[in-house]
């Protein structure tokens, strides 16, 4: 088969944001400036990943579309669907890894419970750095979510029955039809 | 003006794999979408990295993926098991 698509060519294209090892990151914190440094680094990594991800994905998928144009759909599906499934699973894992605020995780509750008690300027500074990291966590989660749905969208285009189903413009008729499907 | 939606085989397969309550929520969301796709509860959002695609919220863990084929016409192409999250700030 002459399908010039190799998984390794698309590793960067489907790359998730750089992972943060929260435990290791906070083990290295000895003073408040260390925490600011960690927040700076996480913000910068997040910005870099988000800035490139969407454009890289759109360009990469357009490249795949060019390469598969005119090729037998069965051959394309044989190569592309496993590759996309792997990428979707990876994106899904990234979404899950960023689903919960790190300061609300069960394994961190005790530590953050103590940090809540820090008052004055030090407490204010501490909360500010933690909330900068929380903002980055949400940006990473929602960026990975966009990647996940973009990959699902591309996968749907390759699937045999991408369209051609029943059409509805009446909510009740649609609901009745769908309820019969799951009964 | 109501939207027109076309169901696809991939979506119906995904719908059947959902739990009963997620499937019920998904069907309700799609009924709502046909009646009023801009309803705030649906959280109708474009997929930024894939032009022409949108998602709506079934519940806080399931979203439906839609492909726009005309201004008021969408294919329902898949269900996904993730939703957007919001910040939860660390407070005193």
Image: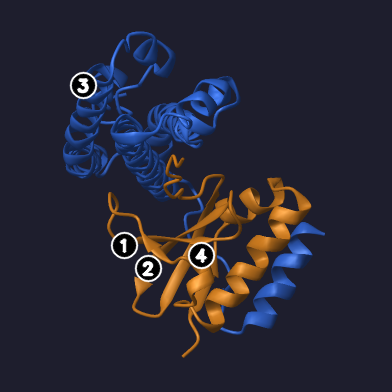
Chain colours: A blue, B orange
Residue at figure coordinates x 66%, y 69% from the top left: B28
Output the chain of dot 4: A
Please tell me whether mark 3 sits on a helix, a strand or a loop.
Answer: helix
Quadrant where the N terminus of chain A sits is top left
Task: Check disc 4 and report the residue beneath it.
Answer: A164
Pair 4/1: label in front: 1
Q: Note whether B50 is above or below A86 in the view shown.
A: below
Task: Check disc 2 and report the residue beneath it.
Answer: B68
Residue at figure coordinates x 51%, y 20% from the top left: A111
Q: Which mark is residue B52?
A: 1
Pair 3/4: label in front: 3
Residue A5 shows in this picture: no
Q: Position of residue B81 (x, y in %)?
A: 56, 45
The disc, 3 or 4, on the residue closer to the chain's N-terminal end is 3
Q: CA distance from mark 2 to mark 4?
A: 14 Å
Output the chain of dot 1: B
Q: Residue furthest front?
A: A120
Q: Both on one chain, marks 1 and 3?
A: no
Q: Is residue A137 left or right of residue B19?
A: left
Output the chain of dot 3: A
Please tell me whether mark 2 sits on a helix, a strand or a loop.
Answer: strand
Residue at figure coordinates x 47%, y 36% from the top left: A101
Q: CA distance from mark 4 to mark 1?
A: 18 Å
Task: Check disc 3 and report the residue beneath it.
Answer: A37
Q: CA distance from mark 1 to mark 3?
A: 40 Å
Q: CA distance from mark 3 to mark 4?
A: 54 Å
Please tell me whether mark 1 sits on a helix, a strand or a loop.
Answer: loop
Q: Note whether B36 is above or below A163 in the view shown.
A: below
Tag 1–tag 2 contact (CB < 8 Å): yes
């Amino acid at each position: 088969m002459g399908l010039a698509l190799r998984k390794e060519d698309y590793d960067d294209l489907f790359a998730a944001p750089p992972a943060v090892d929260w435990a290791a990151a906070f083990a290295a914190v000895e003073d408040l400036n260390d925490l600011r440094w960690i927040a700076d680094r996480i913000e910068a990594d997040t910005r870099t990943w988000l800035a490139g991800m969407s454009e890289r994905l759109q360009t990469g998928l357009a490249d795949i579309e060019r390469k598969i144009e005119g090729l037998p759909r069965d051959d394309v599906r044989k190569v592309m669907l496993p590759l996309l499934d792997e990428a979707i699973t990876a994106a899904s894992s990234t979404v899950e890894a960023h689903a919960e605020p790190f300061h609300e995780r069960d394994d961190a509750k005790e530590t953050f419970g103590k940090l809540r008690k820090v008052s004055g300027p030090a407490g204010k500074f501490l909360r500010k750095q933690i909330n900068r990291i929380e903002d980055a966590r949400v940006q990473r989660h929602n960026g990975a979510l966009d990647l996940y749905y973009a990959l699902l969208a591309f996968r749907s285009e390759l699937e045999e029955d991408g369209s051609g189903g029943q059409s509805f413009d009446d909510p009740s008729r649609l609901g009745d039809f769908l309820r019969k499907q799951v009964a | 003006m109501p939207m027109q939606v076309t169901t696809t085989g991939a979506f119906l397969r995904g719908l059947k794999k959902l739990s009963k309550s997620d499937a019920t929520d998904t069907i309700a969301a799609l009924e709502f979408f046909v009646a009023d796709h801009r309803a705030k509860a649906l959280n109708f959002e474009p997929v930024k990295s894939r032009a022409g695609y949108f998602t709506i919220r079934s519940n806080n863990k399931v979203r439906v993926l839609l492909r726009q084929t005309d201004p008021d016409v969408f294919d329902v192409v898949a269900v996904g098991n993730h939703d957007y999250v919001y910040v939860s700030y660390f407070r005193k």
